[in-house]
Amino acid sequence: MSESVETRPSSQVPPHELPASLRDAGLANWIREPLDDAVDRRRRIIMPPAAATMGTPASAYQAALLAEGQQPDAIFMMGDNPALAKMPERPALKDFYLLRFGPIPRTHLLQSARVARENGLDEKVIMACLLHDIAIAGLLSANHGYWGAQLVAPYVAAEIAWAIEKHEALRYFPDESVGYRYPEAYIGYFGAGYHPPDYIRREHEAARRHRWYMTSRLITINDIYSFDPDVVVDFDEFEDVVGRNFRQPAEGLGFDGSPVAHMWRTMIWPNNFL
Ligand SMILES: [Fe+2]
Ligand SMILES: [Fe+2]
């Protein structure tokens, strides 16, 4: 793993005088104690986003967290969360991989890109493999192909963004002509009888007829699941590919005023109250 993971501050927070309801629910980690050298001694309350808690027991604690945030010694989290590595002022793609993405999705993306390179595939396919699940890594899992495509669209060739979007639907449908089978892993994830919804079926059928079909299909072929923690792939292996295929904005991702800048800022400061 990269050195940034080891140097990341501990997320362990000593329990404060929490209301019992929050403590019993294990919500202590949503409340940041001030660090010893913090100028501002107030606690920072993290309100988890609706998309992460809807339909889960955690949604029941919204009112309690809201009340906690209004205590005189507390404010809501805005800006840098000390539990996360500080991002540079002008973050580049690599900073998100090293300072924000967890080891499992990061390794998955880097390994997929490495396999694509070993298979001698075109650079745009290697780049698409490197990016294909970044929404899972840093933003949202549901509809991840679509979120991921939007995140990168201003910075990559249209074909790469298209391929990332469509890989989500193509994963469910075999293509024997290129040796792609329904993933074993999906049987474990969703059960043997799972049928993708109609909108995914329609997406697959339309993608099949598109001139860029094979670019997206190649993502699914190189979309290997290997979560071996001993396998280390360095992001710098792809520095050349990224340099030629990802237009890093000079102002940094999140600050270039693009239509998706807010999505990158959400990954920089994922715990902001607003
Ligand atoms: Fe995916
Ligand atoms: Fe994947």
Image: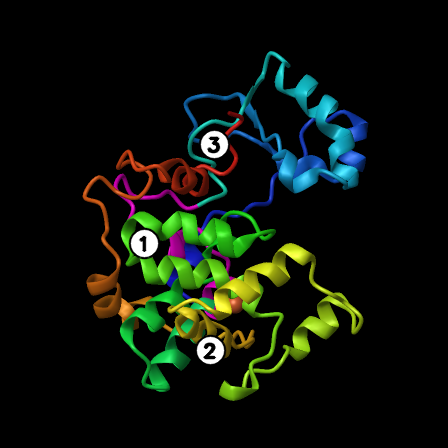
Q: Is residue 148 above or below residue 106?
A: above
Residue 254 horizontal side relative to residue 168, left or right: left
Near-viewer residue (42 or 99): 99
Q: Residue 154 appears at what percent x and percent y?
A: 30, 48
Mark 1 touching mark 2, by CB under 8 A?
no
Point 50% across, 21% down: residue: 41
Q: Can the viewer see residue 121 in this picture?
A: yes
Residue most extreme to the top? 72
Near-viewer residue (68 or 33): 68
Q: Residue 56 appears at what percent x and percent y?
A: 77, 41
Task: Give, as a three-letter code, the residue at label 3.
Answer: Asp
Q: Residue 82 appears at what percent x and percent y?
A: 46, 38
Residue 210 horizontal side relative to residue 66, left or right: left
Task: Give, as a three-letter code, the residue at label 1.
Answer: Leu
For disc 3, the neighbor class at 10 Å (few under 14, some 14 to 19, many from 20) is few
Magenta range: 85-108
Point 50% across, 73% down: residue: 220
Task: Give, as a three-letter code, the residue at label 2.
Answer: Asn
* Residue 18 figure quarter: top right
Residue 94 magenta: yes
Residue 137 horizontal side relative to residue 155, left or right: right
Near-viewer residue (106 or 244): 244
In the picture, the disc for residue 222 is 2
Point 64% across, 78% down: residue: 182
In the picture, the disc for residue 188 is none
Q: Is the CB atom of the residue marked by disc 2 within 8 angstroms of ligand 2's nearest atom?
A: no
Residue 6 horizontal side relative to residue 228, left or right: left
Q: Residue 85 appears at what percent x and percent y?
A: 41, 46
Give the label, 3 or 2, closer to the camera.
2
SS at mark 2? loop
Residue occupied by mark 1: 93
Residue occupied by mark 3: 36
